[in-house]
Image: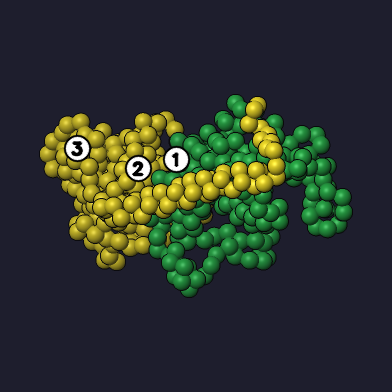
Chain colours: A green, B yellow
């Protein structure tokens, strides 16, 4: 016998879907800014595995070259919407009690390992079905902390003299830029895994993020 | 809560219900996506002010108002020990030419009680300042060097504006490059008129004989080879602000 079970509150669905284009715009305008000085790399000491840059030909092909002014203006426009949406989301989860489903607890880390092993087909038995499993709790809480990290490192880069205490907390201006950059790479990694997991979980699960309800067997 | 679980008589009823909810949900999602796309198109087709769509320009100005309200001359850019001194980087020659006639160079000041034209030795007679601190370029790189010069605020105290002013404008000789500064940033104690970097007198690449170093702004505001300083209540033109950048560009 089928039934409909409420999964995601309306507010959370809106916060989620509003965040998607906002984060995309922040990353894209961030790329326009990064083009001007693409200084980061993967490597240790003198050894560089990969430079975090596209090469001028690729930049030109993607039309993301020579757009620093535009990138900054967009970044400092959409930052407000991105920050406000994030703050409202956190406030909502706190006041609605929804945070209880989202914040990891003592069991989450053990369960998260179980989830990862199961997803990699290294362990047969599925983790116990819950609204959010341990891996999800860790991921969804970490992404919020990352968001906070982006706001703080962003503020440090944006006003490095007025908030010089914040700059020194991150270890200097260039370190604040470093963290700001790698947090963004973190979002991209999160996005790839997130979308893969959503595809794997199937339509019923995805639809719940739009209509709020999931169909289950009683 | 009553709407946590919806149960119906048959599975078909659930299917029908979820179909209806999906239709409503995805239509709403489609409308929201279209509205967002429309908003984006609207934003990018607005009339431009200083080569920037006006909503973006207005937002930069609103951000500026917030920044100015929070700004304090007491908050300083960090200073570093000599071990942190790096090489000065050259980035652009706007308004600069290799030939400098140091003998006949003058720093002109407009907006004081009378027009003023200062020689290098006039400027060097002000209290000398040395400061090891960072210049942050708007491109993202930064450099820590030793700056030698005098405080702009000391110069302004000795040659004060004829009236209270809100802005200071600066230009290279011939106005190849020009910047506008708000008075609070100009009067910041770490804002210097510089004639030497890392104990080397400036060469023409770095803006000989005299340049600005203003750590409460991006490097674009640290104008090289100053020919004219203007005290004014009219917001001064700014080379890069006319090309899509933030006029304030403040740190």
Whole-Å distance between the Cαs marked 1 and 3?
30 Å
Q: Nearer the viewer, mark 1 or mark 3?
A: 1
The residue shown at (33%, 57%) is B207
Q: Position of residue B179 (x, y in %)?
A: 28, 49
Q: Is mark 2 on a helix, strand or loop?
A: helix
Q: Is residue B64 left or right of residue A29?
A: left
**Badge 1, how many Cα within 10 Å: few under 14, some, many 20+?**
few
* Image position of B53 (left or right of A215): left
- What chain letter is assigned to the residue under label 2? B
How far across and down, in percent of the image, does residue B248 sit? 33, 43
Residue under the point 82% across and 42% down: A128
The vertical placement of B69 against B96, above or below, is above
Find numbered disc 1 in the image and state the secondary structure of the residue it sits on.
Answer: helix
Looking at this view, is B249 or B163 the one in front? B249
Q: Any mark on residue A80, and which?
A: 1
Q: Which residue is drawn at 60% across and 36% down?
A: A9
Same chain for mark 2 and mark 1? The answer is no
Q: Mark 3 points at which residue?
A: B233
Q: Do the residues bearing badges 2 and 1 touch, measured as CB atoms within 8 Å?
A: yes
In the orientation shown, which residue stands out farthest toward the left? Answer: B114
Quadrant holding the C terminus of chain B? top left
Mark 2 Cα-neighbour bin, 10 Å: few <14, some 14–19, many ≥20: some
Q: How many numbered marks have been drawn onto this rendered protein structure?
A: 3
Q: In x, y percent, where is residue A167?
A: 54, 40
Nearer to the camera, B29 or B228: B29
In the foreground, A179 or A70: A70
């Amino acid at each position: 016998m089928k039934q409909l079970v409420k999964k995601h509150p309306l507010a959370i669905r809106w916060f989620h879907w509003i965040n998607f284009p906002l984060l995309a715009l922040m990353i894209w305008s961030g790329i326009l800014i990064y083009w001007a000085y693409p200084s980061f790399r993967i490597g240790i000491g003198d050894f560089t595995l990969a430079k975090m840059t596209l090469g001028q030909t690729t930049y030109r092909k993607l039309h993301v070259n020579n757009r620093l002014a535009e990138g900054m203006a967009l970044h400092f426009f959409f930052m407000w919407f991105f920050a406000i949406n994030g703050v409202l989301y956190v406030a909502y989860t706190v006041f609605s009690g929804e945070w209880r489903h989202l914040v990891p607890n003592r069991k989450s880390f053990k369960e998260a390992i179980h989830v990862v092993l199961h997803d990699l087909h290294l362990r047969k038995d599925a983790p116990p079905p819950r609204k959010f499993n341990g891996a999800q709790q860790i991921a969804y809480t970490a992404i919020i902390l990352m968001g906070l990290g982006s706001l703080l490192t962003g503020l440090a880069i944006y006003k490095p003299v007025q908030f010089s205490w914040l700059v020194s907390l991150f270890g200097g201006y260039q370190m604040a830029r470093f963290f700001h950059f790698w947090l963004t790479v973190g979002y991209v990694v999160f996005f790839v895994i997130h979308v893969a997991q959503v595809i794997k979980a199937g339509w019923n699960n995805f639809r719940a993020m739009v209509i709020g309800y999931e169909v289950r067997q009683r | 809560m009553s709407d946590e679980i919806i149960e119906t008589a048959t599975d078909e009823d659930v299917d029908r219900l979820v179909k209806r909810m999906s239709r409503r949900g995805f239509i709403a999602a489609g409308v929201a996506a279209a509205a967002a796309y429309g908003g984006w198109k609207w934003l990018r087709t607005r009339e431009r002010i200083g080569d920037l769509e006006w909503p973006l320009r207005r937002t930069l100005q609103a951000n500026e108002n917030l920044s100015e309200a929070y700004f304090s001359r007491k908050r300083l850019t960090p200073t570093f020990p000599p071990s942190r001194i790096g090489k000065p980087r050259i980035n652009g020659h706007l308004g600069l030419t290799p030939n400098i006639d140091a003998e006949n160079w003058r720093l002109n000041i407009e907006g004081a009680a009378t027009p003023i034209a200062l020689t290098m030795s006039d400027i060097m007679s002000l209290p000398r300042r040395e400061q090891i601190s960072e210049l942050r370029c708007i491109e993202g790189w930064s450099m820590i060097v030793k700056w030698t010069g005098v405080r702009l605020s000391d110069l302004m105290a000795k040659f004060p504006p004829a009236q209270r002013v809100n802005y200071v404008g600066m230009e290279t000789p011939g106005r190849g490059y020009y910047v506008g500064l708000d008075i609070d940033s100009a009067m910041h104690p770490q804002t210097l008129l510089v004639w030497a970097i890392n104990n080397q007198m400036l060469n023409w690449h770095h803006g000989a004989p005299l340049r600005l170093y203003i750590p409460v702004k991006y490097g674009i505001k640290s104008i090289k080879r100053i020919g004219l300083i203007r005290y004014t209540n009219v917001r001064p033109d700014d080379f890069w602000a006319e090309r899509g950048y933030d006029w304030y560009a403040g740190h």
